[in-house]
Image (cartoon, rainbow, N blue to C red):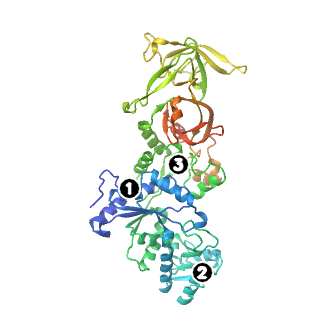
């Protein structure tokens, strides 16, 4: 029995599962889990894990549990819990009727710790954190035994119960596994299983507990209690696998999941460390976890990325054992390709320049029928008002044009998209010599028709000045100016924040959109013709104006920059 989805991309994890199923392992079941810690927002690396775990469960008719690793309550809160649920749901996956929490198992975890103590495999240690580090040894030197390692079972049971009762202050004592202080794997040098944490209100258990289990102890037991068959995690946990197995091998539990590691996602022009992302938020370098420049799923959603594009990206990068860094352009291309098919077209003028069509009747308004998508008739059309005064983009006019310029120039002609051919007759300037208005004429015989004998090379976008909707447009770009800010910081002896891109956000406050966009809802994404793809933000500007975020440009504007840097 193998995957029921023959189109699913093969990888070494699926091959392992296929072999397990063929051998009748786990009774033919496939059960995975996604176990985030609710101490921040999920990022694109977590999306890879979500797609892997939930995707395998889907393709093998199995199950995938959403389980919160909530064993560190002083860094966790319910906001992060809800944001993670929203992200998983947005990506298109369902965890069924129940959300799991590691805290669901606190009593069982405690009892398993008692079992380890009774077997002589765990002890209460009074060393300070600093002393514990000194005793641990190094990669080349073995550690040495704690002076408390040989306490009796009875003394350890008494001290552990008193730890639970709240008798000792934070840091006074921990419960450690008794494994091997000389092990070449530092994770097996009597790791901590429990520590004391007073004065913390846990978002699920309140003030019930003052001792909390460590991740490396909690995770394998949670997997086993839930009947997980394949525990998929990133490569940094490969050295933790012997401890995962040791815990399960030494307690009375019927299920022993298989831990399998895969490479984590490293993405150019950003950082993936939750600590660094938290720092960017807390120190005000971005406007929150959902800032559209952040690699968080919430930020990508606000920017206008689609779930289908993110899932496609995760499929394309694949699953492997080798660490690699993925080009940001691949993610952007996935977004661009999806939006090219599904995003309706609209016109928006981001740098407005007024055009007065002097031979057009002052009071006349024409409603022009415009297709919503040039390659998809099923998207229908909308009515676009046209009148005597319109806005064009200031970059579509040049008094002194550069070579091969095909847009509007003094005395030249250009077509207004879906409308008429106009000719620039006069340029109006202010006292500073800046162009503030163009006086033009139009040819009424050119609506949808190419004029005979005249080559009109340029087509530009526009909106009716009388009907336009005002908007603030935010042009988001890559958060960092170099592909690998961590490597650049290490090489030059700087901080990674020194490589933040100063142009990652440009705000245009005086933009005009075609009137149908007044009906858009937050999250709606459109292609602004010739400008890129844009998404309506749920927030509004201080004056109440709608905010539109640039999702992605029409082309990879960084490609030439990256080639020049090679």
- Comparing 144 with 382, the one in front is 382
Report whether residue 238 is seen.
yes
The tag earlier along the polypeptide, 3 or 2, is 2
Residue 412: give its label: none
- The residue positioned 56% from the left and 52% from the top of the image is 271
Tell me how far mark 3 sits from mark 1, CA to CA. 25 Å
Question: Residue shown at 61%/44% (left/top)?
Answer: 501
- The crowd level at tag 3 (other Cα within 10 Å; few <14, some 14-19, many 20+) is many
Q: Is residue 69 left or right of residue 148?
A: left
- Asked whether residue 555 appears in the rendered view, the answer is no
Q: Are marks 2 and 1 in contact (CB under 8 Å)?
A: no
Disc sitting over residue 55 in the figure: 1
Question: Quick one: quadrant of the N terminus?
Answer: bottom left
x, y percent for residue 550: 54, 38
Residue beneath the point at 49% across and 53% down:
87
Q: Which residue is mark 2?
A: 165
Residue located beneath label 3 in the image: 268
């Amino acid at each position: 029995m193998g995957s029921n989805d023959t189109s699913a991309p093969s990888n070494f994890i699926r091959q392992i599962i296929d072999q397990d199923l063929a051998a009748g392992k786990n009774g033919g079941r496939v059960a995975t889990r996604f176990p985030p810690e609710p101490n921040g927002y999920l990022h694109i690396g977590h999306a890879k894990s979500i797609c892997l775990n939930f995707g395998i469960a889907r393709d093998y008719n199995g199950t995938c549990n959403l389980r919160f690793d909530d064993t560190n309550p002083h860094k966790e809160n319910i906001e992060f819990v809800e944001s993670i649920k929203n992200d998983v749901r947005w990506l298109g996956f369902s965890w069924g009727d129940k959300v799991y929490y590691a805290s669901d198992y606190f009593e069982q975890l405690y009892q398993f710790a008692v079992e380890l103590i009774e077997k002589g495999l765990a002890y209460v240690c009074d060393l300070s954190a600093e002393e514990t580090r000194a005793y641990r040894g190094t990669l080349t030197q073995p550690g040495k035994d704690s002076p408390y390692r040989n306490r009796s079972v009875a003394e350890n049971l008494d001290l552990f119960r008193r730890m639970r009762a709240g008798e000792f202050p934070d840091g006074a004592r921990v419960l450690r596994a008794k494994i091997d202080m000389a092990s070449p794997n530092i994770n097996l040098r009597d790791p901590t299983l429990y520590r004391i944490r007073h004065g913390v209100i846990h978002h699920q258990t309140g003030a019930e507990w003052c001792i909390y289990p460590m991740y490396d102890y909690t995770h394998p037991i949670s997997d086993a209690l839930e009947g997980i068959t394949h525990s998929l995690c990133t490569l940094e946990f490969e050295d933790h696998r012997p401890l995962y197995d040791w815990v399960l091998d030494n307690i009375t539990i019927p299920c022993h999941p298989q831990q399998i590691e895969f490479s984590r996602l490293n993405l150019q022009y950003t950082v993936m460390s939750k600590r660094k992302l938290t720092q960017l938020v807390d120190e005000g370098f971005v406007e929150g976890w959902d800032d559209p420049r952040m690699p968080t799923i919430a930020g990508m959603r606000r920017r206008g990325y689609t779930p289908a594009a993110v899932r496609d990206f995760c499929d394309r990068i694949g699953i492997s054992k080798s660490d690699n860094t993925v080009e940001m352009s691949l993610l952007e291309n996935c977004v661009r390709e999806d939006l090219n098919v599904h995003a309706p077209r609209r016109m928006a003028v981001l740098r407005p320049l007024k055009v007065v069509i002097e031979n057009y009747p002052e009071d006349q308004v024409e409603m022009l029928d415009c297709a919503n998508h040039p390659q998809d008739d099923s998207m229908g059309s909308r009515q676009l008002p046209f009148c005597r005064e319109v806005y064009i983009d200031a970059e579509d006019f040049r008094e002194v044009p550069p070579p091969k310029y095909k847009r509007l120039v003094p005395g030249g002609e250009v077509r207004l998209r879906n409308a008429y051919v106009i000719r620039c007759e006069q340029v109006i300037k202010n006292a500073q010599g800046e162009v503030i208005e163009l006086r033009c004429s139009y040819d009424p015989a050119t609506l949808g028709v190419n004029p005979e004998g005249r080559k009109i090379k340029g087509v530009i976008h526009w909106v009716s000045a009388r009907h336009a909707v005002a908007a603030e447009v935010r042009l988001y770009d890559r958060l960092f100016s170099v592909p690998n800010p961590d490597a650049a910081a290490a090489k030059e002896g700087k901080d990674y924040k020194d490589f933040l891109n100063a142009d990652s956000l440009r705000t245009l406050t005086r933009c005009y959109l075609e009137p149908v966009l007044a009906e858009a809802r937050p999250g709606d994404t459109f292609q602004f013709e010739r400008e890129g793809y844009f998404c309506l933000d749920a927030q509004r500007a201080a004056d109440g104006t709608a905010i539109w975020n640039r999702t992605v440009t029409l082309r990879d504007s960084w490609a030439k920059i990256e080639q020049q840097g090679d």
